[in-house]
């Protein structure tokens, strides 16, 4: 039956949109991060055997979104806008308990103010960062 076989709409990060400037790229990164928050929180809360299959599926979606957001951030010319966008990605990584990725991205931020704000918000970032 064709009625039940509906095509799912593309995710925000799957759309083939190429932002023309830093402002559009920053908006797109924000949209991606907002749409992936639920996935990140679900991944962080999953435990047990039954959760492994769902974690794999959700993990693929999460990784695709992060990859897209990082590619957009990499193309940004304005350092301040890029730092803010990367900080949004870091917050998403912390929600998903991907602390290794969050700590690596924290080193990419040039603004000390933004770094300090992120560390104050998420104290788990300071543990490994202080050791380096």
Image (spheres, rainbow, N blue to C red):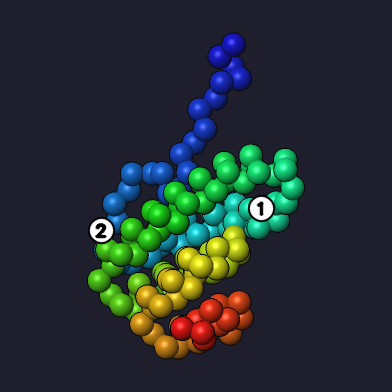
Q: Quadrant of the N terminus?
A: top right
In percent of the image, x 63 and y 53: which residue is there?
43
Q: Is residue 80 visible?
A: yes
Tally of numbered tags: 2
Residue lying at the far front of the rendered structure: 131
Label for residue 120?
none
Q: Find residue 117 and report its horizontal and vertical position in percent.
A: 52, 84
Q: CA distance from mark 2 to mark 1?
A: 33 Å
Relative depth, front residue between 38 and 46: 46
In percent of the image, x 46 and y 39: which residue is there?
10
In percent of the image, x 61 and y 77: which residue is there?
124
Q: Is residue 25 visible?
A: no
Relative depth, front residue between 32 and 130: 130
Please tell me whether residue 80 is drawn above or below residue 93 in the rendered image. below
Relative depth, front residue between 23 and 48: 48
Q: Find residue 15 and report its horizontal and vertical position in percent.
A: 38, 44
Q: Is residue 77 left or right of residue 128?
A: left
Label 1, residues with CA under 10 Å away: few <14, some 14-19, many ≥20: some
In percent of the image, x 46 and y 83: which residue is there?
132
Please tell me which of labels 2 and 1 falls first in the chain: 2
Provide the secondary structure element on which disc 1 rests.
helix
Q: Find residue 51 and report its horizontal and vertical position in percent.
A: 69, 44
Q: Residue at label 1? A: 42
Q: Residue at label 2? A: 20
Q: Find residue 129 and report its horizontal and vertical position in percent.
A: 50, 81
Asked whether the residues under the numbered discs 2 and 1 touch, taking CB atoms below 8 Å apart as contact, a structural biologist would say no
Label 2, residues with CA under 10 Å away: few <14, some 14-19, many ≥20: few
Provide the secondary structure element on which disc 2 rests.
loop
Please tell me whether residue 98 is drawn above or below residue 117 in the rendered image. above
Q: Is residue 56 left or right of residue 102?
A: right
């Amino acid at each position: 039956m064709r009625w039940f076989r509906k095509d799912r709409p593309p995710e925000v990060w799957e759309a083939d949109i190429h932002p023309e400037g830093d402002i559009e790229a920053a908006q797109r990164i924000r949209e991606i991060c907002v749409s992936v928050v639920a996935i990140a929180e679900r991944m962080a809360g999953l435990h047990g055997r039954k959760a492994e299959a769902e974690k794999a599926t959700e993990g693929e979606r999460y990784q695709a979104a992060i990859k897209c957001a990082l590619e957009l951030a990499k193309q940004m010319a304005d350092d301040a806008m890029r730092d803010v966008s990367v900080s949004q990605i870091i917050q998403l990584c912390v929600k998903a308990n991907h602390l290794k990725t969050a700590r690596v991205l924290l080193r990419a931020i040039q603004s000390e103010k933004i770094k300090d704000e992120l560390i104050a918000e998420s104290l788990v970032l300071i543990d490994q960062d202080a050791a380096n």
